[in-house]
Amino acid sequence: MQSIKTLLTSSETALIEASQLSLKEAKFESQLLLQSVLKVNRAWLIAHENDALQANKHADFQALLTRRLAGEPIAYILGSREFYGLNLTVTPDTLIPRPDTETLVEAALDKIAVAAHITVLDLGTGTGAIALAIAKNRPQTNIIAVDSSKAALEIAERNAQNLSIDNVQFILSHWFDALDDKRFDVIVSNPPYIEAGDSHLTQGDLRFEPLSALSSGIDGLDDIRQIIADCLIYLKPQGWLMLEHGYNQAESVADLMAEIGLVNIETLKDLGDNHRVTLGKNPLIVSTHWD
Ligand code: GLN
Protein backbone atom coordinates (compact mmCIF):
# COMPACT_ATOMS: atom_id res chain seq x y z
CA MET A 1 0.00 0.00 0.00
CA GLN A 2 1.21 3.50 -0.83
CA SER A 3 1.82 6.07 1.85
CA ILE A 4 0.12 9.46 1.71
CA LYS A 5 3.48 11.07 1.06
CA THR A 6 4.35 8.83 -1.93
CA LEU A 7 0.94 9.36 -3.45
CA LEU A 8 1.16 13.14 -3.10
CA THR A 9 4.62 13.19 -4.65
CA SER A 10 3.56 11.23 -7.72
CA SER A 11 0.45 13.40 -8.09
CA GLU A 12 2.59 16.56 -7.94
CA THR A 13 4.84 15.27 -10.71
CA ALA A 14 1.85 14.41 -12.90
CA LEU A 15 0.26 17.84 -12.37
CA ILE A 16 3.47 19.69 -13.15
CA GLU A 17 3.88 17.72 -16.39
CA ALA A 18 0.28 17.63 -17.62
CA SER A 19 -1.09 20.93 -16.41
CA GLN A 20 2.09 23.04 -16.27
CA LEU A 21 1.50 23.93 -12.64
CA SER A 22 4.34 25.26 -10.50
CA LEU A 23 5.61 22.94 -7.76
CA LYS A 24 3.83 25.10 -5.18
CA GLU A 25 0.49 24.92 -7.04
CA ALA A 26 0.88 21.18 -7.70
CA LYS A 27 1.53 20.50 -4.00
CA PHE A 28 -1.40 22.66 -2.97
CA GLU A 29 -3.83 21.05 -5.42
CA SER A 30 -2.68 17.49 -4.62
CA GLN A 31 -3.26 18.14 -0.95
CA LEU A 32 -6.69 19.69 -1.63
CA LEU A 33 -7.78 16.66 -3.66
CA LEU A 34 -6.64 14.20 -1.02
CA GLN A 35 -8.15 16.31 1.77
CA SER A 36 -11.50 16.12 0.00
CA VAL A 37 -11.26 12.33 -0.41
CA LEU A 38 -10.26 11.76 3.23
CA LYS A 39 -12.38 14.64 4.58
CA VAL A 40 -9.49 15.97 6.65
CA ASN A 41 -7.74 19.31 6.92
CA ARG A 42 -4.23 20.13 5.75
CA ALA A 43 -2.68 19.83 9.21
CA TRP A 44 -4.00 16.27 9.54
CA LEU A 45 -2.59 15.35 6.14
CA ILE A 46 0.87 16.64 6.97
CA ALA A 47 0.89 14.94 10.38
CA HIS A 48 -0.13 11.61 8.79
CA GLU A 49 2.03 11.66 5.67
CA ASN A 50 3.61 8.30 6.49
CA ASP A 51 0.26 6.54 6.97
CA ALA A 52 -0.76 3.96 4.39
CA LEU A 53 -3.78 4.80 2.27
CA GLN A 54 -6.70 2.37 1.93
CA ALA A 55 -7.17 0.98 -1.57
CA ASN A 56 -10.65 2.49 -2.01
CA LYS A 57 -9.41 5.95 -0.98
CA HIS A 58 -6.53 5.57 -3.36
CA ALA A 59 -8.98 4.84 -6.18
CA ASP A 60 -11.16 7.82 -5.23
CA PHE A 61 -8.11 10.07 -5.29
CA GLN A 62 -7.02 8.76 -8.70
CA ALA A 63 -10.48 9.50 -10.10
CA LEU A 64 -10.27 13.13 -8.99
CA LEU A 65 -6.70 13.48 -10.18
CA THR A 66 -7.63 12.13 -13.61
CA ARG A 67 -10.28 14.84 -13.95
CA ARG A 68 -7.80 17.51 -12.92
CA LEU A 69 -5.18 16.19 -15.35
CA ALA A 70 -7.82 16.49 -18.11
CA GLY A 71 -7.98 20.21 -17.33
CA GLU A 72 -11.15 20.46 -15.23
CA PRO A 73 -10.78 23.37 -12.76
CA ILE A 74 -9.99 22.29 -9.23
CA ALA A 75 -12.82 24.50 -7.94
CA TYR A 76 -15.38 22.49 -9.96
CA ILE A 77 -13.87 19.16 -8.88
CA LEU A 78 -13.98 20.14 -5.21
CA GLY A 79 -17.26 22.01 -5.63
CA SER A 80 -16.01 24.94 -3.62
CA ARG A 81 -13.67 27.93 -3.60
CA GLU A 82 -12.61 30.32 -0.89
CA PHE A 83 -13.20 34.00 -1.57
CA TYR A 84 -12.55 36.85 0.86
CA GLY A 85 -12.54 34.35 3.74
CA LEU A 86 -15.86 32.78 2.70
CA ASN A 87 -16.19 29.17 1.60
CA LEU A 88 -18.42 29.23 -1.49
CA THR A 89 -20.10 26.42 -3.38
CA VAL A 90 -19.07 26.60 -7.03
CA THR A 91 -20.52 24.70 -10.03
CA PRO A 92 -19.98 24.85 -13.81
CA ASP A 93 -23.01 27.19 -13.88
CA THR A 94 -20.95 29.84 -12.13
CA LEU A 95 -17.73 31.69 -12.79
CA ILE A 96 -15.01 30.65 -10.34
CA PRO A 97 -14.34 33.57 -7.97
CA ARG A 98 -10.81 35.02 -8.49
CA PRO A 99 -8.54 36.65 -5.93
CA ASP A 100 -8.39 39.67 -8.31
CA THR A 101 -12.06 40.33 -7.59
CA GLU A 102 -11.22 40.95 -3.92
CA THR A 103 -10.02 44.37 -5.17
CA LEU A 104 -13.63 45.18 -6.08
CA VAL A 105 -14.87 44.04 -2.65
CA GLU A 106 -12.27 46.22 -0.96
CA ALA A 107 -13.20 49.22 -3.09
CA ALA A 108 -16.83 48.81 -2.00
CA LEU A 109 -15.99 48.28 1.68
CA ASP A 110 -13.81 51.38 1.53
CA LYS A 111 -16.81 53.51 0.52
CA ILE A 112 -19.29 51.93 2.96
CA ALA A 113 -18.99 53.02 6.60
CA VAL A 114 -19.25 50.11 9.04
CA ALA A 115 -22.62 51.11 10.46
CA ALA A 116 -24.06 52.60 7.25
CA HIS A 117 -27.60 51.59 6.35
CA ILE A 118 -27.15 51.76 2.62
CA THR A 119 -28.25 49.83 -0.43
CA VAL A 120 -25.90 47.91 -2.68
CA LEU A 121 -26.54 46.22 -6.03
CA ASP A 122 -24.35 43.40 -7.39
CA LEU A 123 -24.91 42.85 -11.12
CA GLY A 124 -24.16 39.34 -12.41
CA THR A 125 -23.54 37.85 -8.99
CA GLY A 126 -22.65 34.28 -10.09
CA THR A 127 -21.76 32.39 -6.89
CA GLY A 128 -22.75 35.50 -4.92
CA ALA A 129 -19.09 36.08 -4.04
CA ILE A 130 -19.01 39.88 -4.17
CA ALA A 131 -22.45 40.46 -2.63
CA LEU A 132 -21.82 37.97 0.18
CA ALA A 133 -18.36 39.34 0.99
CA ILE A 134 -19.79 42.86 1.28
CA ALA A 135 -22.83 41.62 3.22
CA LYS A 136 -20.70 39.71 5.70
CA ASN A 137 -18.42 42.66 6.37
CA ARG A 138 -21.15 45.33 6.38
CA PRO A 139 -24.13 43.61 8.02
CA GLN A 140 -26.18 46.83 8.08
CA THR A 141 -26.25 47.15 4.31
CA ASN A 142 -29.19 45.98 2.21
CA ILE A 143 -27.92 44.17 -0.83
CA ILE A 144 -29.65 43.07 -3.99
CA ALA A 145 -27.75 40.58 -6.14
CA VAL A 146 -28.98 39.80 -9.64
CA ASP A 147 -28.03 37.29 -12.29
CA SER A 148 -29.59 36.35 -15.63
CA SER A 149 -28.83 32.68 -14.94
CA LYS A 150 -31.38 30.89 -12.77
CA ALA A 151 -28.89 28.09 -12.10
CA ALA A 152 -26.25 30.55 -10.88
CA LEU A 153 -28.78 32.31 -8.67
CA GLU A 154 -29.68 29.03 -6.98
CA ILE A 155 -26.02 28.51 -6.09
CA ALA A 156 -25.74 32.08 -4.80
CA GLU A 157 -28.81 31.58 -2.62
CA ARG A 158 -27.42 28.32 -1.29
CA ASN A 159 -24.16 30.11 -0.43
CA ALA A 160 -26.04 32.81 1.47
CA GLN A 161 -27.87 30.14 3.45
CA ASN A 162 -24.73 28.12 4.21
CA LEU A 163 -23.02 31.26 5.47
CA SER A 164 -26.10 32.45 7.40
CA ILE A 165 -26.02 35.77 5.56
CA ASP A 166 -29.48 37.29 5.44
CA ASN A 167 -28.97 40.82 4.13
CA VAL A 168 -28.77 39.82 0.47
CA GLN A 169 -31.85 39.44 -1.72
CA PHE A 170 -31.43 37.53 -4.99
CA ILE A 171 -33.35 38.50 -8.12
CA LEU A 172 -33.41 36.97 -11.60
CA SER A 173 -32.53 39.87 -13.89
CA HIS A 174 -30.43 40.65 -16.92
CA TRP A 175 -28.44 43.61 -15.58
CA PHE A 176 -31.00 46.26 -14.48
CA ASP A 177 -33.99 44.82 -16.37
CA ALA A 178 -36.05 43.60 -13.39
CA LEU A 179 -35.15 46.37 -10.93
CA ASP A 180 -38.00 48.80 -11.68
CA ASP A 181 -37.69 51.88 -9.48
CA LYS A 182 -35.05 50.61 -7.02
CA ARG A 183 -32.11 52.95 -6.34
CA PHE A 184 -28.69 52.16 -4.88
CA ASP A 185 -25.85 53.89 -3.06
CA VAL A 186 -23.30 51.49 -4.52
CA ILE A 187 -23.49 49.39 -7.68
CA VAL A 188 -20.76 46.77 -8.15
CA SER A 189 -20.19 44.31 -10.96
CA ASN A 190 -17.69 41.83 -12.30
CA PRO A 191 -19.30 41.48 -15.72
CA PRO A 192 -17.95 39.43 -18.62
CA TYR A 193 -15.15 41.46 -20.22
CA ILE A 194 -12.87 39.19 -22.21
CA GLU A 195 -12.53 39.93 -25.94
CA ALA A 196 -14.46 37.43 -28.10
CA GLY A 197 -11.38 35.99 -29.83
CA ASP A 198 -9.02 36.03 -26.82
CA SER A 199 -6.86 32.90 -26.75
CA HIS A 200 -7.25 32.64 -22.95
CA LEU A 201 -10.84 31.47 -23.50
CA THR A 202 -9.51 28.19 -24.88
CA GLN A 203 -6.93 27.69 -22.13
CA GLY A 204 -6.90 26.54 -18.50
CA ASP A 205 -9.94 26.93 -16.23
CA LEU A 206 -11.70 29.32 -18.64
CA ARG A 207 -12.46 26.43 -21.08
CA PHE A 208 -14.83 24.99 -18.47
CA GLU A 209 -16.49 28.19 -17.23
CA PRO A 210 -19.75 29.66 -18.61
CA LEU A 211 -18.82 31.72 -21.68
CA SER A 212 -21.68 34.12 -20.92
CA ALA A 213 -19.86 35.05 -17.69
CA LEU A 214 -16.51 35.58 -19.41
CA SER A 215 -16.74 37.10 -22.85
CA SER A 216 -18.56 40.17 -24.15
CA GLY A 217 -18.22 41.23 -27.76
CA ILE A 218 -15.24 41.99 -29.97
CA ASP A 219 -13.54 44.38 -27.56
CA GLY A 220 -14.96 42.71 -24.42
CA LEU A 221 -16.80 45.91 -23.47
CA ASP A 222 -20.36 45.23 -24.68
CA ASP A 223 -21.79 44.52 -21.22
CA ILE A 224 -19.72 47.21 -19.52
CA ARG A 225 -21.06 49.75 -22.06
CA GLN A 226 -24.63 48.67 -21.30
CA ILE A 227 -24.17 48.83 -17.53
CA ILE A 228 -22.58 52.29 -17.68
CA ALA A 229 -25.24 53.58 -20.10
CA ASP A 230 -28.06 52.63 -17.71
CA CYS A 231 -26.44 53.14 -14.30
CA LEU A 232 -27.55 56.73 -13.64
CA ILE A 233 -31.19 55.63 -13.55
CA TYR A 234 -30.37 53.30 -10.64
CA LEU A 235 -27.68 55.22 -8.76
CA LYS A 236 -28.73 57.46 -5.89
CA PRO A 237 -27.25 60.98 -5.80
CA GLN A 238 -23.58 60.65 -4.79
CA GLY A 239 -23.80 56.90 -5.40
CA TRP A 240 -20.83 54.92 -6.73
CA LEU A 241 -20.52 52.62 -9.73
CA MET A 242 -17.59 50.15 -9.42
CA LEU A 243 -16.64 47.80 -12.23
CA GLU A 244 -14.07 45.07 -12.60
CA HIS A 245 -12.51 44.99 -16.08
CA GLY A 246 -9.63 43.62 -18.13
CA TYR A 247 -6.04 44.72 -17.45
CA ASN A 248 -6.06 46.85 -20.65
CA GLN A 249 -9.57 48.33 -20.35
CA ALA A 250 -9.14 50.93 -17.58
CA GLU A 251 -8.92 53.89 -19.95
CA SER A 252 -11.96 52.84 -21.99
CA VAL A 253 -14.02 52.24 -18.86
CA ALA A 254 -12.96 55.58 -17.32
CA ASP A 255 -13.85 57.36 -20.61
CA LEU A 256 -17.28 55.70 -20.72
CA MET A 257 -17.91 56.76 -17.11
CA ALA A 258 -16.79 60.33 -17.84
CA GLU A 259 -19.05 60.50 -20.92
CA ILE A 260 -22.18 59.95 -18.84
CA GLY A 261 -21.01 62.48 -16.26
CA LEU A 262 -19.64 60.37 -13.41
CA VAL A 263 -17.01 62.17 -11.32
CA ASN A 264 -14.10 61.25 -9.00
CA ILE A 265 -13.21 58.46 -11.42
CA GLU A 266 -10.28 56.32 -10.34
CA THR A 267 -8.74 52.97 -11.20
CA LEU A 268 -7.42 50.45 -8.69
CA LYS A 269 -4.85 47.71 -9.21
CA ASP A 270 -5.26 44.04 -8.32
CA LEU A 271 -2.81 41.80 -6.46
CA GLY A 272 -0.96 41.15 -9.71
CA ASP A 273 -0.45 44.92 -10.18
CA ASN A 274 -2.90 45.10 -13.11
CA HIS A 275 -5.48 47.86 -13.53
CA ARG A 276 -8.58 45.91 -12.51
CA VAL A 277 -11.34 48.07 -11.02
CA THR A 278 -12.59 51.51 -12.07
CA LEU A 279 -15.08 53.54 -10.05
CA GLY A 280 -16.97 56.74 -10.52
CA LYS A 281 -19.56 58.76 -8.60
CA ASN A 282 -22.94 60.18 -9.54
CA PRO A 283 -22.37 63.96 -9.14
CA LEU A 284 -26.01 64.73 -8.33
CA ILE A 285 -26.57 66.03 -4.83
CA VAL A 286 -30.37 65.88 -4.82
CA SER A 287 -32.49 63.17 -6.34
CA THR A 288 -34.18 63.99 -9.63
CA HIS A 289 -36.56 61.09 -9.12
CA TRP A 290 -39.95 61.43 -7.48
CA ASP A 291 -39.18 58.72 -4.90
N1 GLN B 1 -10.86 37.83 -14.56
C1 GLN B 1 -11.31 36.68 -15.26
C2 GLN B 1 -10.18 36.12 -16.09
O1 GLN B 1 -9.56 36.80 -16.84
C3 GLN B 1 -12.48 37.00 -16.16
C4 GLN B 1 -13.66 37.37 -15.38
C5 GLN B 1 -14.64 38.13 -16.18
O2 GLN B 1 -14.72 38.06 -17.40
N2 GLN B 1 -15.41 38.84 -15.48
O3 GLN B 1 -9.87 34.98 -15.96
Image (spheres, rainbow, N blue to C red):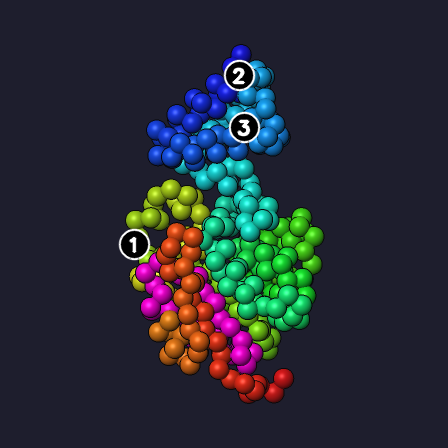
Residue at the extreme top of the image, as rendered: 1
Amino acid at pointer 2: Ser
The quarter of the picture where residue 139 lies is bottom right
How many angstroms separate mark 2 from mark 1 (CA)?
46 Å
Q: Position of residue 123 (x, y in %)?
A: 52, 64
Which span is picked out in magenta? 225-253
Asked whether mark 1 and ligand 1 are closer than 8 Å, the reply comes as no
The answer to whether mark 2 and mark 1 are in CB contact below 8 A is: no
Label 2: element kind: loop
Residue 210 visible somewhere in the drawing: yes
Tell me the tag on residue 34: 3
Residue nearest the viewer, comparing 196 with 260: 260
Counting every numbered tag in the picture gives 3
Q: Nearer the viewer, mark 3 or mark 1?
A: 3
Residue position marked by numbered label 1 in the rendering: 197
Amino acid at pointer 3: Leu
Q: Position of residue 67 (x, y in %)?
A: 45, 32
Q: Earlier in the sequence, mark 3 or mark 2?
A: 2
Residue position marked by numbered label 2 in the rendering: 3
Q: Nearer the viewer, mark 3 or mark 2?
A: 2
Residue nearest the viewer, comparing 159 with 154: 159
Examine the structure image and report whether residue 247 is included in the region drawn in magenta. yes
Examine the structure image and report whether residue 76 is included in the region drawn in magenta. no
In the displayed structure, would residue 263 be above or below residue 218? below
